[in-house]
Image (cartoon, coloured by chain):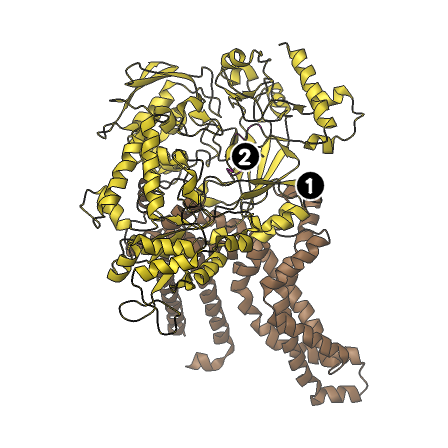
Chain colours: A brown, B yellow
């Protein structure tokens, strides 16, 4: 038993190590480095670009050294809890991530809740009233939700809300940006949250609704339902007491997959909406070859996934005797 | 003139402004029944032409030149409150005896308020265009200041005199001037920068050419007394004022000294305590390489100092020790604080535009383009802002083309180096179509590599080979012996394949290059040359440029102001026809050869060598002299006649927008279309 656990654990460590190496190298694969990006940005704003400045910056950031040395330096620092600095912002990566992770989780949790609550409700309604007008309407809307790109939806909703005089983009109005927390600021936040919540949630909603509808339909035809109904159990009570609970199983078992998403957020939508989440920061770091922030975030996300898998391995291990025997 | 008379005059002017339903004052204070008393609290309109003879290095100079007396000093109520609470010394002890005087463009402003901006957290500078201020430069230039030393006013310093024999410059510092933490600025701070930062490779990044003589030896600095310094040029240096005008050759030794071993024996330990490897790391981080204000704890001389940096916002606060005043004696800036919404680079600009139009920011985001004009105009009233359109005179062409003359492809090298090939391409472009289709008709045909405000520019240059004449273009290519294929569709190379040019470009931030390339490809089809447009990420393209692997350099011809050229080198007129360190457009290896005297790179033709020498001869001349003019004229002429870097249409006008609550900013042509913030922003004020 311990051998199995140790083996899984070693695999996990090895996997994290390899992923961190591979991602570190891949980030540097494109020609040039962060300094090239910086030079072009300076040129784009009409500033003088001097070779001496660029060379000095390269040395200062350690970009003049071979990749393996850069990796080694970064990784030893990470082991000591230092995630490195962001070239773009000249601030510690840990600080930057810490600032964003709360907001990211807040939005993700809101939109996940939205997706599951609305999705399950729609799924139940369309299963119970199969082939009714409602079912068709939900099905069509659901497919539209699945098929339309989120960022497009974001743009359209934004224009509608803007024209209706609502608040768009970001999470706070400018007037509350640096205000201390207050009831008004909280209300302002509440005004901004629905948009990302709905947009990020819709695709999920459609998926959840389809799964819920299918499994519930299966359940509804089972004998115990028919029996219960023939014994005169009230319809609503019957529905919620057994088939829905059973039908929820496949959904509950996949909820865990959303964990990395909670931390990373959704890149494109968040960019369109200008949300201060982790996703757009990772994206911009990758584009600009802002090495340490990109590598550290990727390492963080991989670790979450790998640890998640390890934990579920453990759970399976304790649940399934077959694994224990082998 | 007494103060009362000044105020009366101002009142009169204000009333005239109100009556002449023009300015924003008229719109916002339409209530004519306002009492005179109330108006005195508001901004006082000035009736002189904005941005003309408006800078004075000292009150004495102001009084001598205008005949007015500078009234007693005033300060923001915010600071007055801090003085009252004993938090801050009296105003008189915070300002130099002789502050710099600036006459604001339209109004004597009112104190207070918060300016709301949007910006990126780029390279730690929190660049907003507004906070990256030019107010603390060594010399303040007039808006039209080209390379003319007479148009620069001593700014950080009170005055200067150049030795009769031209061997040195003596500068008198402003006595009583303070860093933003209240420590005096004196000769030691200047010497510290010159001796310990500039001349230390570990601490100074950038070209030091302007601090060395022709032989590459350092100039030197000496302390005459606490408030007088003298630089010895170690030779002569005629263009010192122009060359040093944007310099800030001073650093707070009382603060940075703690990270420098010459000034503090615990420098290493001090830096390590803050988490740096050694004193160099600590010093560099606190001093910052490019922006002087990106670390809140580093004392500085700017009107605004960084206060707080968070994920979603950055705040700046007025510098209580700022050393410039308006003509009414008000310590500048007028604005108390700046709040910057921080957004991620590469995010969607549309949201920012929406946010601006719903009055969340005071300045439109920098991504606003000419194509946004209709939308901006439509919402001008409901969004309570005004659109500002200025000619973009620092960019000569919206898109310039420089074939890669040093290409290793033998056949293509022959093509590119034949002027007829370039002429045919220039003639094939339908410039009116470009202008109408992409720029709402706001641009005109323009082929020269420099804009028309350059010394040495002549009228014929802009339209040289700018007409649309496909027939003549084809005749030129026929003359070169480039045969058509059987269908008469493409011209053929020696292998019998269509001549194909890979048109790689990277400038996606301009937002119009995709469309432009499409139209150009159609135009070049008319002369049988097959262009394949291809967007390439900037990093990749840069390395291809440097590796001499590309067919053609395509870029907007920006950054080419005469002043920048004179301070550095005329980058649009010699290979690689852009900054070689970032965006070498063409023939990078030629430049390498020229810079290393043949040690590296590929030898260019004689004409290029001549142009290179000419450029550096021009840099050694003095502005205003006949030599200055004739040399640059010759260099431009050679470039234009050879179409080395030829343009399509002139750069579209810069479009920006600003909330009506912000006043006293440059809204006219005076600043040549510079971005908001490139002009004195310490005189801007909030008018609710």
Inspect the magenta stretch and tell me whether residue B509 lies in it: no
Dot 2 falls on a residue whose secondary structure is helix
Q: Quadrant of the C terminus of chain A?
A: bottom left
Q: Chain of mark 1?
A: B
Query: Residue at 59% across / 64% down in the picture?
Result: A150
Query: Residue at 38% across / 34% down in the picture?
Result: B456
Q: Quadrant of the N terminus of chain A?
A: bottom left
* Magenta segment: B673-683
Residue topped by disc 2: B669
Residue B262 can be seen, yes or no: no
Q: Chain of mark 2?
A: B
Dot 1 falls on a residue whose secondary structure is loop
Up the image or down, B391 lies above or below B68; here it is below
Residue topped by disc 1: B384
Q: CA distance from mark 1 to mark 2?
A: 22 Å
Query: Residue at 25% across / 50% down in the picture?
Result: B589
Q: Which of the 4 quarters of the picture holds residue B261?
A: top left
Q: Are marks 1 and 2 in contact (CB under 8 Å)?
A: no
* B317 sits left or right of B282 in the view: right
């Amino acid at each position: 038993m311990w051998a199995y656990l140790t083996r899984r654990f070693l695999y996990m460590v090895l996997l994290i190590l390899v992923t961190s190496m591979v991602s570190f190298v891949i980030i540097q694969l494109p020609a040039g480095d962060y300094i090239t990006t910086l030079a072009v940005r300076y040129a784009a704003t009409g500033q003088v670009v001097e070779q001496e400045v660029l060379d000095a910056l390269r040395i200062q950031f350690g970009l003049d050294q071979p990749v393996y040395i850069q990796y080694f330096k970064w990784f030893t620092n990470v082991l000591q809890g230092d995630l490195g600095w962001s070239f773009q912002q000249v601030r510690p990566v840990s600080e930057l991530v810490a600032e964003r992770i709360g907001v990211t989780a807040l939005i993700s949790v809101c939109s996940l809740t939205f997706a599951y609550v609305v999705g399950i409700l729609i799924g139940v309604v369309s299963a119970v009233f199969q082939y009714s007008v409602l079912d068709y309407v939900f099905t069509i809307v659901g497919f539209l939700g699945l098929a339309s790109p989120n960022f497009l939806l974001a743009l359209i909703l934004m224009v509608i809300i803007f024209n209706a005089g609502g608040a768009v983009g970001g999470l706070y109005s400018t007037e509350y940006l640096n205000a201390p927390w207050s009831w008004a600021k909280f209300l302002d936040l509440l005004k901004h949250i629905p948009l990302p919540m709905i947009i990020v949630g819709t695709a999920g909603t459609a998926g959840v609704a389809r799964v819920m509808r299918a499994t519930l339909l299966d359940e509804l035809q089972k004998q115990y339902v028919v029996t219960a109904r023939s014994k005169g159990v009230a319809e609503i009570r019957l529905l919620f007491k057994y088939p829905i609970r059973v039908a929820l199983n496949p959904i509950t078992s996949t909820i865990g997959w959303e964990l990395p998403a909670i931390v990373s957020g959704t890149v494109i939508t968040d960019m369109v909406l200008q949300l201060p989440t982790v996703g757009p920061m990772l994206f911009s770091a990758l584009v600009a070859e802002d090495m340490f922030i990109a590598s550290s975030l990727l390492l963080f996300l991989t670790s979450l996934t790998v640890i998640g898998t390890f934990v579920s391995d453990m759970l399976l291990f304790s649940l399934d005797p077959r694994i224990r025997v082998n | 003139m007494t103060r009362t008379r000044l105020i009366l005059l101002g009142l009169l002017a204000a009333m005239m402004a109100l009556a002449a339903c023009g300015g924003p004052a008229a719109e916002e204070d339409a209530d004519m029944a306002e009492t005179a008393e109330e108006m005195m609290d508001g901004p006082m309109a000035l009736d002189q032409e904005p941005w003309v003879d408006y800078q004075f290095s000292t009150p004495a100079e102001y009084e001598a030149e205008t005949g007015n007396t500078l009234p007693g000093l005033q300060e923001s109520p915010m600071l007055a409150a801090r003085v009252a609470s004993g938090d801050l010394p009296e105003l008189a002890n915070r300002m130099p005896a002789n502050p710099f005087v600036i006459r604001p463009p339209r109004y004597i402003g009112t104190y207070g308020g918060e300016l709301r901006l949007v910006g990126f957290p780029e390279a730690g500078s929190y660049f907003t265009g507004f906070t990256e201020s030019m107010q603390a430069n060594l010399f303040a230039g007039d808006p039209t200041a080209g390379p003319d030393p007479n148009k620069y006013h001593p700014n950080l310093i009170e005055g200067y005199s150049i030795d009769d024999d031209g061997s040195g410059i003596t500068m008198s510092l402003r006595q009583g001037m303070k860093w933003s933490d209240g420590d005096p600025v004196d000769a030691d701070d200047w010497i510290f920068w010159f001796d310990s930062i500039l001349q230390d490779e570990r601490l100074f990044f950038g070209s030091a050419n302007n601090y060395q003589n022709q032989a590459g030896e350092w100039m030197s600095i000496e302390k005459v007394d606490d408030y007088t310094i003298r630089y010895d040029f170690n030779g002569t240096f005629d263009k010192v004022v122009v060359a040093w005008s944007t310099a800030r050759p001073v650093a707070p030794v009382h603060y940075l000294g703690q990270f420098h071993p010459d000034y503090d024996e615990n420098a290493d330990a001090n830096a390590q305590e803050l988490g740096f490897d050694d004193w160099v790391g600590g010093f560099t981080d606190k001093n910052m390489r490019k922006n002087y204000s990106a670390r809140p704890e580093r004392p500085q001389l700017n009107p605004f100092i960084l206060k707080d940096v968070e994920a979603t916002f950055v705040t700046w606060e007025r510098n209580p020790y700022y050393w410039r005043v308006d003509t009414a004696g008000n310590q500048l800036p007028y604005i108390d604080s700046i709040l910057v919404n921080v957004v991620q680079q590469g995010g969607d600009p549309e949201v920012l535009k929406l946010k601006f139009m719903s009055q969340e920011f005071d300045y439109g985001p920098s991504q606003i383009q000419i194509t946004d004009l209709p939308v901006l105009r439509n919402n001008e009233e409901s969004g309570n802002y005004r659109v500002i359109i200025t000619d973009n005179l620092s960019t000569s062409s919206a898109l310039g083309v420089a074939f890669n003359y040093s290409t290793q492809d033998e056949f293509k090298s022959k093509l590119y180096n034949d002027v007829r090939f370039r002429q045919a391409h220039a003639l094939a472009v339908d410039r009116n179509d470009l202008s109408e289709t992409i720029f709402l008709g706001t641009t005109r045909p323009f082929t020269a590599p420099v804009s028309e405000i350059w010394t040495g520019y002549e009228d014929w240059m802009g339209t040289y080979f700018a007409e649309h004449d496909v027939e003549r273009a084809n005749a030129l290519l026929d003359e070169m012996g480039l045969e058509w294929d059987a269908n008469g569709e493409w011209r053929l190379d020696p292998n019998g394949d269509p001549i194909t040019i890979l048109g790689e470009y990277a400038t996606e931030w301009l937002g119009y290059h995709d469309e432009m390339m499409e139209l150009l490809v159609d135009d070049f089809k008319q002369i049988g040359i097959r262009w394949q447009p291809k967007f390439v990420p900037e990093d990749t393209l840069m390395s291809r440029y440097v590796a001499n692997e590309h067919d053609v350099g395509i870029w907007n011809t920006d950054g080419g102001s005469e002043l920048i050229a004179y301070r550095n080198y005329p980058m649009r007129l010699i290979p690689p026809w852009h900054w070689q360190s970032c965006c070498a457009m063409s023939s990078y290896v030629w430049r390498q050869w020229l810079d290393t005297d043949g040690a590296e790179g590929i030898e260019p033709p004689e004409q290029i060598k001549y142009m290179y020498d000419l450029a550096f001869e021009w840099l050694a001349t003095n502005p205003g002299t006949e030599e200055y003019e004739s040399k640059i004229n010759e260099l431009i002429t050679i470039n234009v006649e050879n179409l080395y870097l030829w343009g399509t249409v002139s750069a579209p006008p810069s479009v920006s927008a600003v909330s009506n609550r912000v006043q006293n900013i440059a809204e006219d042509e005076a600043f040549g279309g510079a971005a908001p913030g490139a002009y004195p922003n310490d005189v801007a004020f909030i008018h609710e």
